[in-house]
Amino acid sequence: SETEKNTLRSPICAILGHVDTGKTKILDRIRKSKVQEGEAGGITQQIGASFFPVEELRRKTKSIPAAQRLQLSVPGLLVIDTPGHESFANLRSRGSSLCDIAILVVDIMHGLQQQTLESLHLLRVRNSPFIVALNKIDRMYGWEPHQDAPLRDTMKKQEKHVRDEYDARVQKTITEFAEQGINAIEYHKNKDFRKYVSLVGTSAVTGEGIPDLLMLLVQLAQRFMTERLTTRDRLECSVLEVKMIEGLGTTIDVILVNGVLHEGDEIVVCGLNGPIVTNIRALLTPKPMHEIRVKTDYIHHKVIYASQGVKIAAPDLVDAIAGSSLYVVGDEIDREAAIDLAKKE
Ligand code: GTP
Ligand code: MG
Ligand code: NA
């Protein structure tokens, strides 16, 4: 209902994993975007964010009848892309610290790798529920692609040797997870989501298994919503990037994890030369299913509810520090308290 929409925040899902396992490409396939092709060296170097409305999730899981029974009492999911390259451990840590749930992407041809283990550690520390995408199934020898097909459907149409290879790779991955103390199982066999982590084969190139992945994601979000407090009264907002945008001046990209932002709000953010006190001149988001990292036609808002990736235009942001928190002066804290908090960052 509308009332629920006003008190519940959308869950945040981080996508984590070793470099080049296909995290960004999976999001591109879902969004029908080409973000990965535009990345320098094909490497993600910033945290990304895009909003997936419930209607889009529903549309993209139509091919799976069971998914139609799933409901989410929030407008959608905020999906956070993270870099897998080893040198961006700080961004992975920051990304995972913002998330409620996660997708861990593993290259089915490689199994668990160094940053897979690092990501697992981050998820464990935060006790975040997650699912595993075993990506690049199309790279198995003899694979016959069936664009956007649910996993089980395309699997039935593969030659026996391909199915055998898939089964063997899944078994090997399950063993590798067991070595990390994690019980993993193919998702359609998973009868106990508390004990077992679901695995699903995917291809970001053919779209196979993506409907299944999205169905599992909605299931996980739904479970998260029923198990944890999801009110959004308390403000939690994290600065991702400081960017110069023609026509807007210096802007900050933030993840609004919890709470509400209004145009005109007095805000305090960490700056190189001490706390910056300023007022929100414009509150912007990319369109749904668009990446905030990519310059686009932004939507202007008077008010934004968590969770969202938001671009804020305001005076004096040039020295703002990425990775710090943003505070809103108001009922919760006064200006002096906000400045003190920003000083302590
Ligand atoms: P980082 O963010 O840099 O860690 O990489 P990533 O995990 O986001 O992987 P990315 O999306 O950049 O993909 C890496 C490479 O793998 C690209 O060349 C993709 O085209 C390719 N790739 C990704 N997914 C698939 C897939 O399912 N099948 C095949 N064949 N190639 C894929
Ligand atoms: Mg990437
Ligand atoms: Na990459």
Image: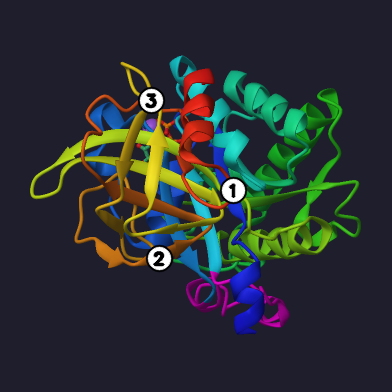
Q: Which amino acid does label 1 sit on?
A: Glu
Asked whether disc 3 touches disc 1, contact meaning CB atoms under 8 Å apart, the reply is no
Residue 72 within the magenta-colored segment of the rendering: yes
Query: Dot 1 corresponds to which residue?
Result: 332
The secondary structure type at the circle numbered 2 is strand
Compared to 183, does 75 lie above or below? Answer: below
- Evaluate whether residue 107 shows in this view: no
Query: Dot 3 corresponds to which residue?
Result: 275
**Where in the figure is residue 108, as x and y percent of width and height?**
60, 38
Q: Quadrant of the N terminus?
A: bottom right
Mark 2 or mark 1, which has the lower sequence index?
Answer: 2
Q: Of the residues tagged 3 and 2, which is closer to the observer?
A: 3
**Where in the figure is residue 114, as x and y percent of width and height?**
60, 18
Residue 89 within the magenta-colored segment of the rendering: no
The picture quadrant where one finds residue 160 is bottom right
Are there few (<14), some (14-19), or many (20+) residues within 10 Å of tag 3?
many
Query: In the image shown, does 101 or 184 lie closer to the viewer?
Result: 101
Q: Over which residues does the magenta segment extend?
A: 55-75
Q: Which residue sits at x=66%, y=65%?
A: 218
Q: In this view, does 2 lie to the left or right of 23?
A: right
Q: Is residue 143 left or right of residue 219?
A: left
**Where in the figure is residue 9, as x and y percent of width and height?**
61, 62
**Where in the figure is residue 159, as x and y percent of width and height?**
61, 57
Q: Which residue sits at x=51%, y=52%?
A: 79
Query: In the image shown, does 39 or 251 lie closer to the viewer?
Result: 251
